[in-house]
Image (tube, helix red, strand yellow):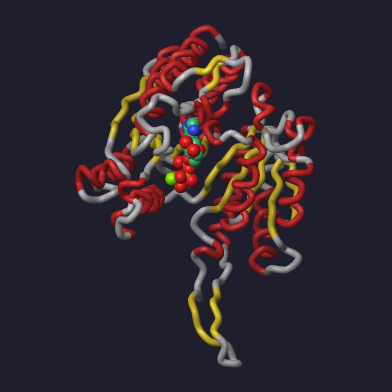
């Protein structure tokens, strides 16, 4: 039975390029899923990125940010395009995205990398290695060497020029990302691997100590530790061993890109960015794909799967999320493919038709 009268406000930020196409399809998917699960969505569509620049002169209008902050979750399409590439930094669409992440105070970036049985051939790895991979990288997003001080350029004792950065993590920063990672592992297969360089770096030794301390709150999750060099190797050697990986900002930047290549299909990969309280930000990992924008060629599945993450990690509506994930698998099983994942003997469809097929599967599959 479903609880009647559940209502959530979702801010939709279609953005640029293929963004509006994939968001329009995903909105229908959310509406249908909601109607079958007793959930009502109130959508607020706001300008963001290049579209906002053209309309208002800034990439993230105040009204867009305040609407996003007041909603239960934020779903973003994609931003950017050739048109704004030469803009000054504060007038770039990408700056709007950084401001949005800051404004929402999100510090945990979740990126799943799954090799779906229907798309094993798309993987860059051998079939027997790729088959069954289903992992999640939880990356710390607001601390570490990208933000640590001191940083800059200078001279050393020999008068030579140097550049330097500092890896800094405060206890609260590690504790909160660790909790998100343990909660995530709990919603998955209950295994968490913390990746660090604790054999060399003090910041990593501290990271490992804090993660171990937080582990006592999650006796049901199995915690292991791995050095980042080994993790990078294991991700291509035997990625099936991983369930959830948690790591710092820079290691997560690198490992999540590495993990996404295992799947080999950029049009399939969703992501979530979560904070301590307040709405999470959900978006496909791909960009605005200006080369195919406006042609009904975009794969909407990355955004549809981002909506499933929104339900699962943003709203705690796990059953509704599973309904969408099941429908995506069913649609692929029936052979429907957009150009980016097409291979012989499948049915080539556009963005809208792929969306229609997912809607059909949502109604028939449970
Ligand atoms: P970013 O905007 O984040 O810098 P990018 O410019 O590096 O990203 P994308 O915009 O993601 O890259 O596009 C890279 C390639 O992948 C392009 O050829 C694009 O057409 C293709 N692509 C990206 N997303 C999709 C999608 N959803 N469906 C089909 N093809 C896609
Ligand atoms: Mg781009």
**Farthest left residue?**
56
Report which quarter residue 8 is drawn in. Answer: top left
Q: Position of residue 71 (x, y in %)?
A: 34, 36
Visible residue check, residue 3: no
User: In the figure, 256 relative to 345: above or below?
Assistant: below
| As drawn, 270 above or below 169 | above
Residue drawn at point x = 50 percent, y = 13 percent:
362
The quadrant of the rendering that contains the C terminus is: top right
Does the image show residue 132? yes
Q: Is residue 239 left or right of residue 276?
A: right
Which residue is situated farthest in the bottom direction here?
158
**In the shown orientation, is residue 105 left or right of residue 271?**
left
Along the viewing direction, whichever of 69 and 94 lies nearer the viewer? 94
Q: Residue at x 49, y 79 (%)?
A: 153
The structure residue drawn at horizontal position 74% and vertical position 40%, both measured from the top left corner, is 239
Judge by depth and name the residue closer to the eye, 316 or 58: 58
Q: Residue placed farthest to the top in the image?
A: 364
Where residue 167 sits: x, y (%)? 58, 68
Q: Which one is in front, 98 or 248?
A: 98
* Image quadrant assignment for residue 245: top right
Total label count? 0
332 vs 67, left or right, is right
Residue occupying the point 54% across, 58% down: 173
- Placement of 90 over or under 305, stated as above or below: below
Q: Is residue 294 left or right of residue 159?
A: left
Q: Is 75 placed above or below 139 here?
A: above
Where residue 285 appears, x then y in whole percent? 50, 40
């Amino acid at each position: 039975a479903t609880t009647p009268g559940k209502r959530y406000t979702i801010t939709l930020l279609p953005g640029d390029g293929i963004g509006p196409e994939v968001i329009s399809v995903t909105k229908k998917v959310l509406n249908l899923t909601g109607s079958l699960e007793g959930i009502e969505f109130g959508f607020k569509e706001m300008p963001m990125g290049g579209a906002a620049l053209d309309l208002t002169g800034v990439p993230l209008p105040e009204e867009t940010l305040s609407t996003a902050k007041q909603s239960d979750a934020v779903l973003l399409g994609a931003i950017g395009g050739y048109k704004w590439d030469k803009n000054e930094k504060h007038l770039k669409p990408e700056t709007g995205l950084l401001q949005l992440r800051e404004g929402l105070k999100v510090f945990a970036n979740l990126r799943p990398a799954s090799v779906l049985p229907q798309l094993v051939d798309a993987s860059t790895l051998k079939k027997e290695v790729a088959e069954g991979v289903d992992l999640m990288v939880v990356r710390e997003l607001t601390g570490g060497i990208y933000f640590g001080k001191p940083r800059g350029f200078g001279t050393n004792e020999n008068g030579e020029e140097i550049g330097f950065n500092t890896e800094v993590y405060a206890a609260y920063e590690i504790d909160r990302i660790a909790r998100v990672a343990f909660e995530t592992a709990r919603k998955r297969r209950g295994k968490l691997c913390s990746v660090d360089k604790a054999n060399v770096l003090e910041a990593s030794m501290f990271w490992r100590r804090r993660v171990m301390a937080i582990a006592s709150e999650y006796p049901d999750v199995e915690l292991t530790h791995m050095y980042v060099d080994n993790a990078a190797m294991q991700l291509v050697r035997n990625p099936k061993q991983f369930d959830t990986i948690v790591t710092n900002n820079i290691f997560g930047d690198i490992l999540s890109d590495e993990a996404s290549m295992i799947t080999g299909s950029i049009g399939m990969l969703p992501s979530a960015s979560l904070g301590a309280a307040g709405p999470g930000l959900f978006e496909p990992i791909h960009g605005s794909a200006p080369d195919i924008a406006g042609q009904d060629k975009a794969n909407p599945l990355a955004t549809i799967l981002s909506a499933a993450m929104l339900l699962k990690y943003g709203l705690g509506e796990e059953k509704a999320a599973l309904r969408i994930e099941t429908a995506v698998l069913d649609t692929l099983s029936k052979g429907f493919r957009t150009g980016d994942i097409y291979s012989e003997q499948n049915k080539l469809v556009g963005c809208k038709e792929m969306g229609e097929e997912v809607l059909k599967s949502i109604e028939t599959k449970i």
